[in-house]
Amino acid sequence: MTKFIFVTGGVLSSLGKGITAASVGTLLKHSGKKIGMLKIDPYINVDPGTMSPLEHGEVFVTKDGAETDLDIGNYERFLDSSYLKSSNFTTGQVYSSVIERERAGGYLGQTIQVVPHIVGEIVNRIKKAGKGHEILIVELGGTVGDIEGLPFMEAIRQMKHDDEVAGTFFIHVTLIPYIKAAGEMKSKPTQHSVQELRRIGITPQMIIARSERPLPKTFKKKLAMSCDVPQDSVIEALDAATIYDIPVTFLRQHILKPIAKELSLGELDPDMGKWDTLVKKIVQPQNKTVVGFVGKYLELKEAYKSLTESLIHAGAHLDTRVEINWVDSEEIEERGAQELLGDCDSVLVAGGFGNRGIEGKIKAIQYARENKVPYLGICLGMQLTLVEYARNVLGLEGANSIEFDKDTPHPMIYLIDNFLDQSGGTQLRTHKSPMGGTLRLGEYPCDTKAGSILRNAYNGEKTILERHRHRYEANPAYRKELEKAGMLVTGESNGLIETVEIKDHPWFLGVQFHPEFTSRLQTPNPIILDFAKASLNAQ
């Protein structure tokens, strides 16, 4: 039977519950335990797929095609594992499945209520996610006291007494504010948060105290006493130079001791040697390179979380700080690419939806191509690579993607009526199809071309697997014309154009998939690693 560790948050949001959950999971995995991860989101959206990145941050895509919360990305990056649809669910999904079952007569005429039906559905989903794992770490989104989070709190409270559950452990992440004028830390917000949990019927067994300053011993003792936890179960979580240092700092405070004792896990001794070496290279690298990151959601850097993290992973393996020069694509439209990208060693054009800032991205691509600057275009960045080449090399005036100009005389990027989905079935996509259900999502194979940058990056692998999140595809009608002019198709998936490169350029690659989704600290994505290497060599 599975044991469960529940991570809740108090006082305010964005304290780092996801990093806490991922760090505990990392330490347990390095101790030889089989770990599963689950993120529960209390919002009513079915998934974050149609939410603005500015609203919710990045949408992370799992290998089986689920659009999930960005914390699933943290879990994968920390634990070097792939998680599936079952690793993230929302209030919207829970209510949808209960209502569907009720409409089909599945409850035999009962009155459907939050307790027991909604709570029962939540419990079943948590147990299902835990199958096949020794320990499932469950992170509850939101903050204790949120109205929408109450059914989830009730569900995990009930699981304490469930005969099918081998053991439970509750971790509460909370804020310790420092009042500058008074010159002291305050434990009262944490006390109130723990009282709220207790009122629901949950007694936390560990407090993760987020603080800007180290906690004095007397303060720790007071916090432990007032929250009714042992003193060794109050763990400091100070701001770190890198999030990847958190598991190591937790380990120094013997975080696994109370967990192992409560869940009867025996003595745990995680081997974090290699991890520690990589962290040191992130914090104090020998080299530096500057990447011009051209995007349009720059108000919230979380919108590009996986991509920025993947550059950190590559840097750790190259002993290099990959510095990001954030460049707003709309600014390039006004001031030109040379002015904003001239000091960068390489150019990266990221994905995105909608036509804002498109012309700026095209100018950035033209700058990288003409000045032989290492270039990586991801998803939309790859599609615009074709548009730029068509306009400025082939001389096709008005060339565009039909996403931005449905009447373009040269649709370099178009919407195919149907394509084979992951299960081999045909899926129909039109302009009128609902946005949430017409994306090519998840892992697809890509056949690589011999001698290409792509195949070389993957150490000669003929077929690779990478994850997608897009609606529009490269139009094969222009392939011959493009190849004749020096743009080569070097990766294909079931006849669809996946990657393009250009002749006589030191490093130029456009990829339709999102390589950042498969990058981890211990195993960086080969394309991102090769791009960072090219950027370093371009100095």
Image (cartoon, helix red, strand yellow):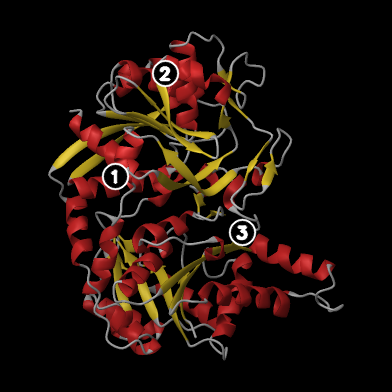
* Residue 175 against residue 529 in the figure, above or below: below
* Residue 440 against residue 258 in the figure, above or below: above
Q: Secondary structure at mark 1?
A: loop
- Among numbered discs 3 and 1, the one appearing first in the sequence: 3
Q: Closer to the observer: label 3 or label 1?
A: 1
Q: Quadrant of residue 473?
A: top right
Q: In this view, which residue lies farthest toward the right?
A: 109
67 lies left or right of 120: left
The answer to whether one can see residue 15 in this image is no
Q: Give the number of marks.
A: 3
61 lies left or right of 403: left
In percent of width and height, residue 39 lies at: 51, 65
Residue at the image point whose x is 35% and y is 37% from the top? 454
Q: Which residue is mark 2?
A: 363
The amino acid type, in three-letter code, at marker 2 is Lys
Q: Quadrant of residue 120?
A: bottom right
Q: Residues within 10 Å of mark 1 (few under 14, many from 20)?
A: few
Residue 57 numbered mark, or none: none
Q: Which residue is mark 3?
A: 43
Q: Closer to the observer: label 2 or label 1?
A: 1
Residue 459 numbered mark, or none: 1
Q: Secondary structure at mark 2?
A: helix
Residue at the image point whose x is 47% and y is 62% from the top? 83
The amino acid type, in three-letter code, at marker 1 is Asn
In percent of width and height, residue 343 lies at: 24, 24
Marks 2,1: beta carbons within 8 A: no
Q: Secondary structure at mark 3?
A: loop
How far is mark 3 from mark 2, CA to CA? 39 Å
Q: Quadrant of residue 174?
A: bottom left
- Among numbered discs 3 and 2, the one appearing first in the sequence: 3
The amino acid type, in three-letter code, at marker 3 is Tyr
